Image (spheres, rainbow, N blue to C red):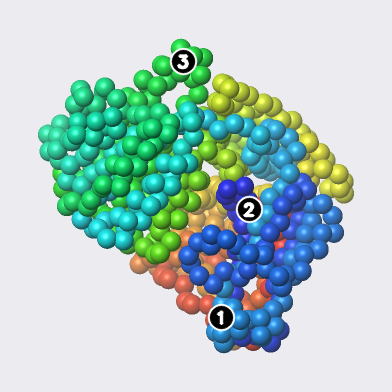
Amino acid sequence: MLQRTLGLYQQVINLNPGQTVRDLQVNVYITESSDIKSLFVPELKVSNEIETDEKENKIVNITRPSGNKAIIHYSPNVDDQEKVGGHCFEGQFIVKYDVDRVHSCGQVLIDEGYFVHFYAPDGLDPLRKLVVFVLDLSGSMSGRKLTQLKQAMTAILDELREGDYFSIVDFSDSVTVHNLDSPSESVVIAPDHSRLHPYNNTFPTSLEVQTAYPANKDYVNKAKQIISKMTDRSVTNIYDALKTAVQVSHKAYEKIRNELKDKNEEALEPMIMFLTDGEPTVGITNLGSIRSMVRELNIPRIPIYSLGFGYGADMNFLKKLSQENGAFGKKIYEASDAALQLRNFYKLISSPLLSNVTFTYIPSQVDSNSVTKKDFRSLSDGSELIVAGKLLLNDGELETDIHSIASNGTTSCTVQGSKIPVDKTEVGDTVVPVEDKKVYGSLERLWAYLTVKQLLDQQDLLDEDTKGNESSKLKEAALNLALKYKFVTPLTSLIVVKPNETDAITEFEEDSSGHDGLPVPIYSGRTSGSMVAGFPDFAIRPAFRHSPPLVTAPPSIFISESLGYRQNGN
């Protein structure tokens, strides 16, 4: 599924023939239900580092048959390929685009008894936010990583908006909550504080004096001075760092919200941005205990966005921590562009438009057990919320209510629609027919993909001592859907057969080794498919061993991608 990030959908096609190719063609066909309002194809990406100034690909030919369709043709000759990567041509061909938002309450697509609701409202002012930055200053952050962290934080502080609030917490063996008015009076929490009282909800009274600061020019400059003087110290006390961050966030949120309430300006979105480059080495180090503590204290949930800096961070733990607290985690790679990676991550979360977003459907119209996640902690500018499910009647109507909190207070909207004939080409305000008919409808596949992903997420978040039958049920449900719709997941694998070498694999075998397969969907339907001439046949089976490597395509390559309704895959 194509995810909307910073206002754009992005389709990435990996080209790696291992040599220059005499006849190389890439065709991308985009068919959307709304007009395509922006379309950009940058030069072939040949590096993993972030491009600060993307240039347009001059070799690409783009045609627009209609407002909602586009055809992108890329056919570099051998000289063009050698200019990019010498005799070993490889890179990523990327297409970026966005569509018009016709209805303020989103776009609902209905097809063959399934619906998908895309929600990305335009024209909303960002919520004021409260950000608690929690920064790892352990010894492993020394050198380039600390320099890059300082560079990123200096830029991030400049991007705080007037009306925002922030706090800076750093940690190593102890945890420091910085006092911007008087740095020498910053509160330092020793590593044994929480170990003696694991779920003690109290912390030094001096923290209650000022736990967050308005993001005006004066306090931003003071924060920059503190950031510039930071030095690496010793060990990694993640338990106390997270506990302190949660306590600071909740106390600051309550205080600021009460102040805003007196001014009839209640909307405030709190968040924690937690960065570490390692695993806990002092205090309470059990990762399950750390997650349990956060779940216990972080009520109501304040989103915790986790950043794992480098190879020493436990991304499995960080992603679970964030998922349990209404957010997501991301890895920051040790490279020359690490500071830019940090800044780009902050951009993803820096402009919350709505909070507490809830989608409500009429029980007589929708199979409530089939509906994917419909309650969301927040919606950020440039992103999109997606809900899918089954209708009780194939040709039934659908009415959706959306309730949320915006910058001007509580808001709601309603979108209605019904199935309309496939042969209609006009685009309505609410419901649009899906033209492309597969063995399984594209919306049905998208629903299946979202459902499998959420089942696997739920299973992954179960604690080791509570998994048991619940884990087995979730795995079984996810596996059955993955096999039915031919998705490659951690429970299934892709078996490749060379052309003309043997018959396609059709039987599913079982094994007890339990190794994960490729965690990538083979097909997930805004629709896309790809074809490489001479590419191996494949079959999907339960994953019990790693899949064999794919064979290299021959020197003559033709790739065709068909995109529609923001889906991608094979």
Looking at the rendered image, the quarter that the N terminus falls into is bottom right
Q: Amino acid at mark 2?
A: Tyr
Which of the 4 image quarters holds residue 46? bottom right
Which of the 4 image quarters holds residue 340? bottom left
Mark 1 surroundings within 10 Å by alpha-carbon count, few (fewer than 14), some (14 through 19), many (20 or more): some
Left or right of residue 338, residue 195 in this image: left
Tell me residue 344's x, y (percent): 48, 51
Residue in the image at 31% along x and 61% along y: 144
Tell me residue 406's x, y (percent): 57, 27
Residue in the image at 43% along x and 47% along y: 155
Q: Which residue is mark 1?
A: 85
Q: Which residue is mark 2?
A: 9
Secondary structure type for disc 1? helix
> Tag on residue 261?
3
**N-term-proximal mark, 2 vs 3:** 2
Q: CA distance from mark 2 to mark 1?
A: 26 Å
Q: Amino acid at mark 1?
A: Gly
Which of the 4 image quarters holds residue 500? bottom right
Q: CA distance from mark 2 to mark 3?
A: 38 Å
Mark 3 surroundings within 10 Å by alpha-carbon count, few (fewer than 14), some (14 through 19), many (20 or more): few
Q: Amino acid at mark 3?
A: Lys
Left or right of residue 97, residue 239 in this image: left
**N-term-proximal mark, 2 vs 1:** 2
Secondary structure type for disc 3? helix
Residue 282, relative to residue 530: is it above or below? above
Q: CA distance from mark 1 to mark 3?
A: 59 Å
Residue 123, relative to residue 87: is it above or below? above
Residue closest to the eye, 241 or 421: 241
Secondary structure type for disc 2? strand
Residue farthest toward the top in the current orientation of the protein: 262
Residue closest to the eye, 506 or 272: 272
Residue in the image at 14% along x and 38% along y: 190
